[in-house]
Amino acid sequence: MQHLTDRSAVDPDAPPPWPPVRLPRPVRALAPTALVMLVLVPLAANDPDFGPTTSPSVNAGLMAFGALALALRRRHPAAVTAATLVSGQLPLAVALYGLAARRGTTTLLYVLAAAAELRLIVPFDLGDVTTPSSLAGLIEDPLVFGAVPILLGLTTHHRAHTVRVLAERNRFLGERNRLLEDARRHVEERAAAAERSRLAREMHDVVSNRVSLITLHAGAGQVARAEDPAAVRETLGLIRTLGLQALTELRGLLGVLTTAADQAPSLRGLPTLVEESRQAGLAVGLTVTGPADGLPAPGPAVQYAAYRIVQEALTNAHKHAPAAEVAVTVEVRPDGLRLAVVNTPAAAESDGPTGGHAPAADGSGLPSGGHGLTGMRTRAGDLGGTLHAGPTAEGGFAVRARLPLGAGRTG
């Protein structure tokens, strides 16, 4: 026994060492009826003092009537209680308990309880209440067969009500927790999808621009003259430089290396970006204006987005208009940073170098995934800006964007 007690103390949620005994419902419903019929009815038939009247046969009949009525106490507790008022004390006590347990504190319970107490007091001669023992005998039956069963029934009723409330509360909490878990999972899935989209966009910009330039320089190296080793070495050096830049940006993007904030792509990198396109054979002009005095400089997020938009626009120009002239304009205004990348109609064929050492290579063979314009619009939209791209009246193509100066700032 000590072992079992220690086990319960260590693990209060542990199952009991034996299963609880619970009788079948029909047995529990008919047990009081069987007890009264087998024990009390024979006693009432043989003892004239065992019952509400002086006739043993009448007492036995009333006791049997009360016993049969108890079989219906679960379905009709009030009617059974009223019927057992003319029966014996035990059937009346069982009926009172069932009424209180099923109906709780109702007006009908009060009425029947008062009638039951009166029924239990009537057989006594109130004139004989002269001693403490006679007084105890007077209150014994109303207390034992009336008040106690009612109190026990009310306790059972309140306990069952509490269990129902707790069960409902647990169901509510379980449903709420399920909804919260679904919402959390949905937020995580959306965040993961947004992060995947961002990484895909960044990788597209890095890989598309750098690899496109590498491809163009490799093509220029193929047509370089063998007797001009200096041009070949310079082309290979450019390819190596572009490859290292692509690897560095990819590492920083994937978290292998952490790029410092002052080393992240920004407006300061536009001249280098334009020069790389010139060296690949694209005629590019760059104009940067502002900010004026008193006007704040664009935030890092805005400068980064502007750099990537210009980068992607130049990549598209390499692919679709390799022999065109491109004008890159960046202007910091009070209403935001405005940038434009506009190219003239694509010429049928380049006549020679257009500002770089390498001959212009045809970019029409470069692969295009069709996601560049979508990525640029997404970048601008994420910062609360706008981007428009489309053909110009002269037959060229223009990308124009406006980005709020303070977008992306956290302080």
Image (cartoon, rainbow, N blue to C red):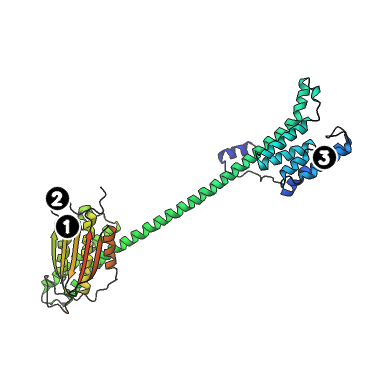
CB of mark 3 within 8 Å of CB of mark 1?
no
Numbered label attached to residue 148? none
**On the image, numbered disc 3 is attached to which residue?**
63
Quick check: 182 above or below 210?
A: above
Q: Earlier in the sequence, mark 2 or mark 3?
A: 3
Q: Position of residue 271 (x, y in %)?
A: 14, 62
Q: CA distance from mark 2 to mark 3?
A: 105 Å
Q: Does residue 87 appear left or right of residue 268 in this picture?
A: right
**On the image, numbered disc 2 is attached to which residue?**
294
Q: Earlier in the sequence, mark 3 or mark 1?
A: 3
**On the image, numbered disc 1 is attached to which residue?**
332
Residue type for callout 2: Gly
Q: CA distance from mark 3 to mark 1?
A: 103 Å
Residue at point 51% right, 50% down?
174
Residue type for callout 3: Met
The secondary structure type at the circle numbered 2 is loop
